Structure formats: C-alpha cells, structure tokens
C-alpha cells in the first residue's frame, strides 16, 4: 500500500511538473528525468521497487513504439532512407563499440559482453523524447523525418545487439556463424510478422463499435503482438513497428471517427503515464543502489560521466563524418564524377548530431537486466549499468534537450512550411470533392451544405484579405460567447445537465477545430474577391492561392505554351509537352521550392514558381522566379495574389535574393515588380530574338533580408 500511495503521489507530482514545463517551454521528458533523479536522492530507506525484467520491455517499449510508428510516413522514410539507415545501423554500432571500449577501459574486470550490453542500452535515441522535444522546436520537415525515423528504428538494431550481449553475459555461447542467420531471421521475420498482423487486425475488429472495447482491444493487441513475436523468436521491436505502420495504412477508412478520436486521446494519456512510471521506477531502483554504493561513489559518478560523454561524442563524430562524405560526393558530382546527392549544411549537420536525447527505451532495457550480480546468477555489474543508463538519459535530456531549441534558432533552422503546404492541399482538395458531389444533389438541404463548403474553401466573402489566424481568433471569441450563454441557461434552470453536456461537447469540437485553424494554417494563404471576368457574370468569384497538383498540369501547359506562341515573357518558339511541365514541377518539389496556382472556381487563372538561378553552388542563396497569368484573367489582380506567397516561400527557404528577367518592352511587368520592392540591376540590349526583332533583357532583383 505504501508503494501504491507513493506512485500515485509521484504521478500527481509529475503532472504538476509537466504543467510547469509547458509554461516555461521545456519538454516534459526533461522534467520527468529530473524528478526521477530527485527521487533517487531522497534521504529515506523505505523507498524501493522491483519490476519483473521480462515485463519491463513489453510494458514500456511496446506501446511507446506503436504510438510513434503509427504516425510515421512510409513515403517520407523511403525518401530519406539513406540518412535514416546511416543513423539506425552505423551510428548505433559506432556508439555501442565506443561505449564498450570506454567501459572496459574504466572497469577492466567487466566482461566484453556486459560492456557491449551497456552500449546497446544507451545507443538508441528515444522516439518519445525526440518527438516531444522536436514538436516544440518545429525544425525543417526533412530533419524532423530523419530524426523521428532514426529514433523509431534504431531501437530494433540496438535491441538485437542487446539480446545477444545479455545472453552471452549470462553464459550463452554464440558464434558469428550462428549470430548472423539469427539476426536475419529476427529482423526479416519481425517485419513480415508485423505486416501480416497489421493487415489481419482490422478484419478481426471491424465489427467492434463500442469505444471502450475498441480502445481496450487496441492496447491488448499491442501487447499480444509483442508476445507473439517473442514466442516465435523474431524481433518484437521490428514486429511492433511494422505492425503499427501497416495498421495506420489499413485502418484509415475502416475506423469510425468516434473510435479514432477516443483512441488518440487515450493513447496520449497512456504514453505519458508510461513515461512517468519508467522514470519513477528507475528512480526507485536507483535509490537503494545509491544508498549502498558507499565507497564506490567516485567509480559510479566517473563511470556514468564517461559513458555520457562517449555517447554524445560518438554521435557527433559519426554524423559529421557521414555528412562530410556527402559533401565530398556532391563536389565530385559537380565535376561529373558521380551521382548528384543532397548534402546538408554544416549547421544542419551540427543540429542532427546534437539530437541524441535518450528516454524510456534506454530506461526499459536497463530495467530488463536480470537482478543480482554474476555470482548470484544475475547480471554482472547490473547496478553500475542502471546508474550509467539513467545518467545518460538525464544528461542528454537536460544538456541536449534544453539547448537544442536555442541552437536551431541561432542557426535559423526553422520549419520550412512543407507540412503546412501539404495540409493546405489536402484541405482544399477534400473540400472541393465534397462541393463537387453536392453540386450534383437537387435537395434543398444540399444547398445549405454547399454554402458551408464554400465557406470552408473561401473562408470569407468580404472585399479585403483576411488572415486565417484572425478567422480562428474570431471563431474562438464566438465560441466563448456561446459558452457564456450556455452557462446562463443552466444557472437559470432553463436546461438540465444532460442538455448542457451535449451542447458543451459540440462546442468542444468546434473549439478544437478553431484552434487548429488559428495555429496551423500558413499565414500567407489569402483569399480575395476579384471582379467578374465577363459582364454576364452576376457575382464575383473567389481566387485561392494553393500548391499545384497533377490535376492542374494541362492548364499549366496551356498557359505556358500560350506565353511561348503569343508573347515575349518566354524567349522560346517551340511549345513543350506535358512531360516537360511535369518534370519541372517534380524538380521544384524535390528541392522544396513552391509551384503555386491561382485557382478561380476550379480554373487555373495563373501560376508562379521559382528555381535555382544558376546550377553552381555559389548561387544557392539566389532564385529566379516566374509568374504567368492566363489571358482571360489578366488585369484581375491574379499576379498580386501570387507574388506575396512566392516571396514568403523564398524567405522561409533561407534564400537571399530573388531575380527576374523581363522583356524591356513589358512596362506592366516592370512596374509590377517595382511595387514589390524589386529594383533594376542591369539591361542587356539585343540579347534575345523573337517575332523577327531583337529583344532587350532587364534584370530586376529583390534582397529578401530587407523587411
């Protein structure tokens, strides 16, 4: 009972500390780690706890991994497989080897198997720790994908090493000829088993509609997958990861909205509680260890500090060596001696090397070591390894977790807006699909829904531009007014509590939607109302600036070829085909460059984009842009809608200069660019020839660092 009361009290304390961490902007794993350390140092002899080692991994690692893997994008992992694989395999092996050598150097009597087990325990950065910290910082999307993919998959490689090392330390004899086939079976079998179970689970639970039962089955299924993998002898880590990724793909359409909302909420709470319990249990186990070390304080402290330093330096060393290799390959490719590769900047490399926060996986693997020392049939140096593991978790979370945000801000490695752009496409296309369906319906009620979706696509129909954040704020104020009225109705007994709860739930959902609209929509997305293009139109038509999709390719091609055949905006005389435009758009997307569309009621009124100014490395901070307007929508303000988000995207991408090359006779384009801060920097007389005459080229540029 005393232990139960202690754990409840500590959970309440952890909740209060987490609330405080949110207010000060610190990631909650940092607070939990500090709380665990404080618990280990409490001056009392009544605190102790034991957890079955066989239960530790299943209890803590299985749900944490599933929660992280469920949100993983297979598309993004595939696109970034090389850096992820480098961190998952080579960085883990380098860390394990470095820690094992240092451990043996400091404690010569420690068996190699024990030292390797310690390296495997502290090698993998933690998915939950990385996610909770990175979400607060909002780094560039590609960096986020690489770090989350690494923290998700490196547990598998580290745990495979861990299992063989623990077995060898306890007396099992394993030769390389036995280990390699076992590793292949464990890894490959785990992936195949996870995919099969992830495909099978939705069919078994499709008829489960009761929300509590559905969520309970999810938790039970997670632990069942782990147990089945261990029983068969394959990697439970890879099984759970593959199971979760497969599950996220096949349940998207089968799971009801109510079950999905409840599931996400419950899993968030469960993962937080499991993280808190892991730190509490380690603190409880460290308490008697620290109490009994007596004359070994220097050994434990020095050993833990050395392991912590080794873990940090090993990651920095490997990441910098790997990225230096990419830089050399890039230089060779520029000389025509190899394939072109994308090499991260020095700042990005330093940031990735500093993202090595450890968490619940390291704690769980340390807790999974058998009790006792080698003489008693337990694991040799168990107390020392647990102490070192906790020191690594505490040190990386505090040292790296608290300094990572300032580092990224100092390096100006901010969110590149890639996720926002994809969300904008998704919201636009889903709303358009619904609107198109409703246009085929003749019921009077369909007209109400059409208006609702028109508002979602347009947001407002006034004559001035409106920011999504302003709309979200107004919605929040409106919902607050509704809540006030609802409270008054209950106080004066006009409605009862049942009705109150029903309306309150509806307002809760509305508030959640308003908050997302206020905080997540890109600030440069704007709507405006433009004049009709013909006198026969009775109402104005809204124009939306959005990212181009494959559906827009024919319209983009028509605008481009019209500019070639009938104008001097493009100094070419030969029309291009659809594959040419598709290749251009894909090239821009691969470089995270925008390709924006002015969408007027489903019709492409114009498009804008920018690309590299020159192919040489020295010009990587400069881009050359272009804006083309459909002939039926010229002088309708379309260019004024496309230019601001194009400039914003260049700034967000870290560009320094935007350049435009303009026909000297195009006075309207020259004046348009001047309105947006472009200045003429040079004229090249008679460098072009089209329509039987020579053309002068005017260069205009805008320095983006200027406000």
Image (spheres, rainbow, N blue to C red):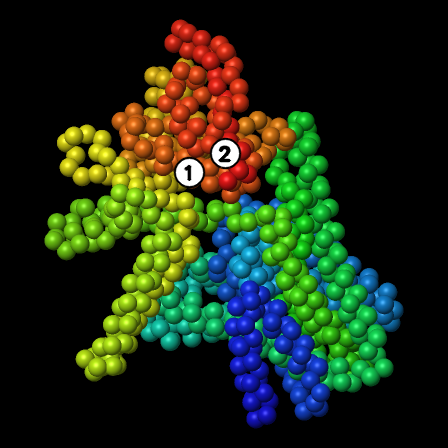
- Asked where in the image residue 35 lies, by quadrant, the reply is bottom right
Q: Nearer the viewer, residue 27 or 472?
A: 472
Look at the image and tell me whether residue 209 can be seen. yes
Residue at far right of view:
108
User: Is 290 left, or right, of 275 in this rendering?
Assistant: right
Picture coordinates of residue 626, whole percent (x, y) = 44, 28
Residue at far top of view:
692
Q: Which residue is mark 1?
A: 644
Q: Which residue is mark 2?
A: 587
Residue at image coords 21%, 38%: 540
Looking at the image, residue 278 lies above or below residue 464: below
User: Is 406 left, or right, of 581 in this rendering?
Assistant: right
Quarter of the figure with the N terminus? bottom right
Picture coordinates of residue 428, whole percent (x, y) = 33, 47
**Dot 1, how many residues are within 10 Å of its Cα: few (below 14), some (14-19), or many (20+)?**
some
Picture coordinates of residue 142, whole percent (x, y) = 55, 48
- Asked where in the image residue 671 lies, by quadrant, the reply is top left
Looking at the image, residue 674 lies above or below residue 164: above
Residue at image coords 72%, 59%: 312
């Amino acid at each position: 009972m005393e232990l139960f009361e202690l754990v409840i009290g500590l959970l309440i304390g952890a909740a209060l500390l987490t609330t405080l961490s949110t207010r000060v902007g610190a990631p909650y794993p940092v607070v939990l780690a500090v709380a665990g350390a404080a618990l280990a140092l409490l001056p009392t002899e009544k605190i102790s706890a034991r957890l079955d080692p066989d239960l530790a991994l299943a209890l803590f690692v299985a749900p944490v991994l599933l929660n992280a893997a469920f949100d993983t994008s297979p598309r993004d992992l595939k696109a970034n497989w090389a850096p992820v694989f480098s961190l998952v395999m080579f960085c883990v092996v380098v860390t394990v080897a470095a820690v094992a050598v240092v451990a043996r150097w400091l404690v010569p009597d420690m068996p190699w198997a024990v030292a390797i087990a310690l390296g495997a325990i502290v090698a993998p950065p933690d998915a939950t720790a990385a996610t909770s910290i990175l979400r607060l910082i909002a780094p560039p999307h590609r960096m986020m994908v690489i770090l989350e993919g690494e923290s998700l998959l490196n547990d598998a490689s580290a745990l495979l090493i861990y299992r063989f090392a623990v077995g060898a330390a306890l007396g099992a004899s394993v030769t390389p000829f036995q280990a390699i086939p076992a590793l292949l079976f464990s890894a490959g079998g785990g992936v195949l088993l996870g995919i099969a179970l992830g495909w099978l689970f939705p069919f078994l639970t499709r008829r489960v509609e009761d929300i509590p039962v559905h969520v309970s089955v999810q938790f039970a299924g997670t632990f069942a997958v782990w147990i089945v993998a261990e029983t068969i002898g394959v990697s439970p880590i890879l099984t759970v990861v593959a199971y979760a990724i497969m599950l996220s793909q096949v349940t998207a359409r089968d799971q009801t909205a109510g079950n999905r909302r409840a599931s996400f909420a419950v899993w968030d709470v469960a993962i937080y509680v499991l993280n808190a319990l892991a730190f509490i249990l380690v603190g409880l186990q460290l308490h008697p260890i620290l109490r009994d070390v007596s004359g070994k304080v220097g050994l434990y402290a020095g050993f833990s500090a050395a392991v912590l330093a080794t873990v940090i330096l090993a990651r920095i060393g490997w990441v910098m060596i790997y990225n230096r290799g990419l830089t050399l390959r890039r230089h060779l490719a520029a000389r025509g001696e190899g394939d072109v590769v994308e090499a991260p900047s020095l700042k990005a490399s330093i940031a990735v090397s500093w993202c090595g926060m450890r968490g619940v996986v390291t704690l769980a693997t340390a807790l999974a070591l058998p009790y006792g020392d080698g003489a008693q049939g337990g694991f040799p140096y168990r107390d020392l390894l647990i102490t070192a593991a906790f020191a690594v978790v505490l040190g990386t979370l505090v040292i790296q977790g608290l300094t990572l945000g300032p580092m990224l801000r100092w390096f100006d490695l901010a969110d590149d807006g890639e996720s926002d752009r994809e969300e904008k496409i998704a919201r636009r296309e889903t709303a358009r699909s619904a609107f198109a369906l409703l246009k085929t319906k003749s019921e009077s009620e369909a007209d109400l829904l059409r208006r609702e979706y028109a508002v979602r696509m347009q947001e407002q129909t006034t004559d001035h531009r409106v920011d999504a954040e302003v709309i979200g704020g107004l919605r929040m104020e409106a919902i607050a007014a509704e809540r006030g009225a609802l409270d008054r109705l209950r106080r004066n007994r006009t409605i009862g509590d049942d009705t109150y709860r029903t309306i309150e739930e509806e307002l809760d959902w509305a508030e959640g939607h308003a908050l997302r609209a206020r905080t997540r929509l890109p600030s440069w997305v704007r709507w405006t109302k433009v004049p009709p293009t013909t006198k026969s139109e009775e109402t104005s038509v809204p124009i939306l600036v959005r990212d181009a999709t494959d559906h827009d390719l024919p319209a983009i091609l028509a605008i481009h070829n019209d500019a070639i055949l009938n104008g001097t905006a493009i100094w070419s005389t030969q029309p291009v085909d659809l594959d040419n435009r598709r290749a251009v758009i894909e090239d821009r997307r691969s470089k995270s460059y925008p390709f924006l569309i002015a969408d007027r009621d489903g019709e492409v009124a114009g498009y804008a984009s920018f690309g590299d100014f020159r192919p040489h490395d020295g010009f990587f901070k400069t881009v050359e842009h272009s804006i083309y307007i459909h002939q039926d929508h010229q002088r309708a303000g379309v260019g004024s809608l496309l230019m601001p988000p194009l400039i914003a995207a260049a700034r967000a991408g870290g560009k320094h200069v935007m350049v435009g090359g303009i026909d000297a006779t195009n006075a309207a384009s020259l004046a348009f660019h001047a309105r947006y801060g472009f200045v003429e920097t040079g004229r090249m007389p008679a460098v072009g020839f089209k329509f039987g005459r020579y053309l002068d080229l005017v260069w205009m540029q805008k320095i983006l660092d200027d406000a």
